[in-house]
Amino acid sequence: MERLSLMTQNPTTRDLIAACRSGDREAMHTLYVENQRRVFSVAMNYFGGNRELAEDITQRVFLKLLVRMDFRGESEFTTWLYRITVNACTDEARKMNRFVDISGIFDLGSYGGVQQLLAESGEVSVVVQREISKLRPKLRVPIVLKYSEGLSYQEIADVLGCSIGTVSSRLNRGHQALAAKLGHLRGAL
């Protein structure tokens, strides 16, 4: 078994994947270091800033990735990784909804309650992030991938397995839903 460090000074993602499949721990560590921020960021935004849950999802995604490494190379590695991450987040949200009523977790109360929260925390982003986390997954995921990860419409379409038109429509509906919920914040910035 040839070690990754002997193969190249700057291994490509394909080199890393091949080395991971042959059990190279250094390659596994490198793949994790290069990609864990992406996974964590999607999970963090998906769950409205819940750091513990985002860390748990990140661990699960990389455990699955390193145990099964079933990437076939039909798309970019990052597209495949985002897909696994979105699926893990969706699965976790389903589990949470099965056992716990989370409808009140992000309840910000009335208009006055939001203003008080803003005055206390000074962070509009907290309110925005929480409202994003309340969106249905079909609307939430494209928004997270677009604005948190900076993916293009085509890349989002590849991750979600849908057309660019569908991505555009979901982003538009997500924007409208957020505008309706966050319109009162226009003067708070």
Image (spheres, helix red, strand yellow):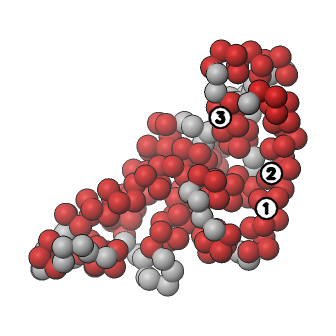
SS under mark 2: helix
Residue at 41% in and 75% down: 70
Q: Pointer 2: residues within 10 angstroms few (<14), some, or many (20+)?
A: some
Give the residue number, with chain letter if any, for mark 3. Answer: 125
The disc labelled 3 sits on which kind of residue? Answer: Ser
Please rate how many residues cluster around mark 1, counting C-alpha atoms within 10 Å: few if below 14, some from 14 to 19, many from 20: some
Residue 32, image x, y percentages: 33, 58
> Mark 3 falls on what kind of element?
helix
Front in this rendered view, residue 100 or 12 = 12
Q: Provide residue 14's location: percent of width, then percent of height.
A: 34, 79
Give the residue at x 27% y 62%.
30
**Contact (Cβ within 8 Å) of mark 3 with mark 2:** no
The percent coordinates of residue 177 (x first, y second) are 84, 47
Q: CA distance from mark 3 to mark 2?
A: 15 Å
Quadrant position of the C terminus in the picture: top right
Asked whether, in this view, residue 7 is left or right of residue 106, the answer is left
**For the point 82% across and 58% down, which residue is it?**
172
Disc 1 marks which residue?
A: 170
Q: Is 187 or 52 nearer to us in this picture?
A: 187
**Residue 76 vertical placement versus 123 (above, below):** below
- Quadrant, the N terminus: bottom left
Mark 1 or mark 2: name the one nearer the start of the chain: 1
| Gap between marks 1 and 2 measured at Cα | 8 Å
Q: Tell me if residue 16 can be seen.
A: yes
- Of tags 1 and 3, which is closer to the observer? 3
- Which amino acid is tagged 1? Arg
- 70 horizontally vs 147: left or right: left
Which residue matches tag 2? Answer: 175
